Image (cartoon, grey):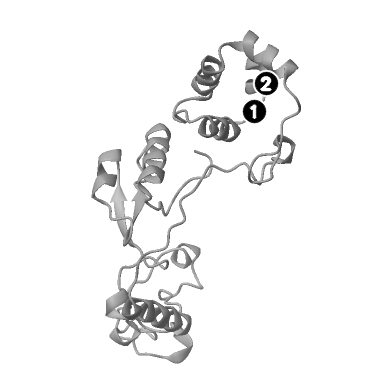
């Protein structure tokens, strides 16, 4: 039976652990050892498998053969924020305004490649064509391009982003109005623990990595 577990992916092993009510944290070797111990050892599991009838499909209608690379995904929380009608209207208005907002390019961005990759910079110089508002030089950042104040700094989904660097930071997140964004310096193992804890608390992670 252990050999069968070795051929399974981590996502499949976690699904089996969830069905049996076992923890899903740890490396692949730890997940396999946990399943073997829960089933009473490899020999007992092999005998049980030989005498048991063919497995029925799971509740969601998927068999083991139906899994492929596109469907091998860990459970991901996809909550929606709890918003009142005023905030929903503000988000919709901000989205409509964003479609009409011009792209702000820095002076001479078309001439030098390094400038085309950089962000906006205010134009300077007495003869600068963009500063003098020549139309063919692009738009200037002005106060009139600002968006709805009520929806400022909100994620497009409506959540307010909270930076998270460890599991303890998740305890201060409100799942109804806030979502977590894991710091870029967080390692892979700690990131996986943060994902698991966020799923338990019902917190949405905005930058979840699929390879963890």
For the point 41% across and 76% down, the residue is: 107
Q: Report whether 193 appears left or right of 171.
A: right
Q: Report whether 26 appears left or right of 56.
A: left
Furthest toward the top, the residue is: 43
| Mark 2: few/some/many CA within 10 Å (<14, 14-19, 20+) | few
The residue pinned by badge 1 equals 8
For the point 48% across and 81% down, the residue is: 99
Is residue 166 visible in the rendered image? The answer is no
The residue pinned by badge 2 equals 4
| Mark 1: few/some/many CA within 10 Å (<14, 14-19, 20+) | some
Question: In this view of the protein, which residue sits in the foreground, 49 or 118?
Answer: 49
Quarter-of-image position of residue 151:
bottom left
SS at badge 1: loop
For the point 40% across and 51% down, the residue is: 205
SS at badge 2: helix
Q: Position of residue 211 (x, y in %)?
A: 53, 40
For the residues bearing labels 2 and 1, Cβ distance under 8 angstroms: yes
- Quarter placement of the N terminus: top right
Q: CA distance from mark 2 to mark 1?
A: 7 Å
Q: Position of residue 22 (x, y in %)?
A: 47, 28
Q: Position of residue 184 (x, y in %)?
A: 37, 45
């Amino acid at each position: 039976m252990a050999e069968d577990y070795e051929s399974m992916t981590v996502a499949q092993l976690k699904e089996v652990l969830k069905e049996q009510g076992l923890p899903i944290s740890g490396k692949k070797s730890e997940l396999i050892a946990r399943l073997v111990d829960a089933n009473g050892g490899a020999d007992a599991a092999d005998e049980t498998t030989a005498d048991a009838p063919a497995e029925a499909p799971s509740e969601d209608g998927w068999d083991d053969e139906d899994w492929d690379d596109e469907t091998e995904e860990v459970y991901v929380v996809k909550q929606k924020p709890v918003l009142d009608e005023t905030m929903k209207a503000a988000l919709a208005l901000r989205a409509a305004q964003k479609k009409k907002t011009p792209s702000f390019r820095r002076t001479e961005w078309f001439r030098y490649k390094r400038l085309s990759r950089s962000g906006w910079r205010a134009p300077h110089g007495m003869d600068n064509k963009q500063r003098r508002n020549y139309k063919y030089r692009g738009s200037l950042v002005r106060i009139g391009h600002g968006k709805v104040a009520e929806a400022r700094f909100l994620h497009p989904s409506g959540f307010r982003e909270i930076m998270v660097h460890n599991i303890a930071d998740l305890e201060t997140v409100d799942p109804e109005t806030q979502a977590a964004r894991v710091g870029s310096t967080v390692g892979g193992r700690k990131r996986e623990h943060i994902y698991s804890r966020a799923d338990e608390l019902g917190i949405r992670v905005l930058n979840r990595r699929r390879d963890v």
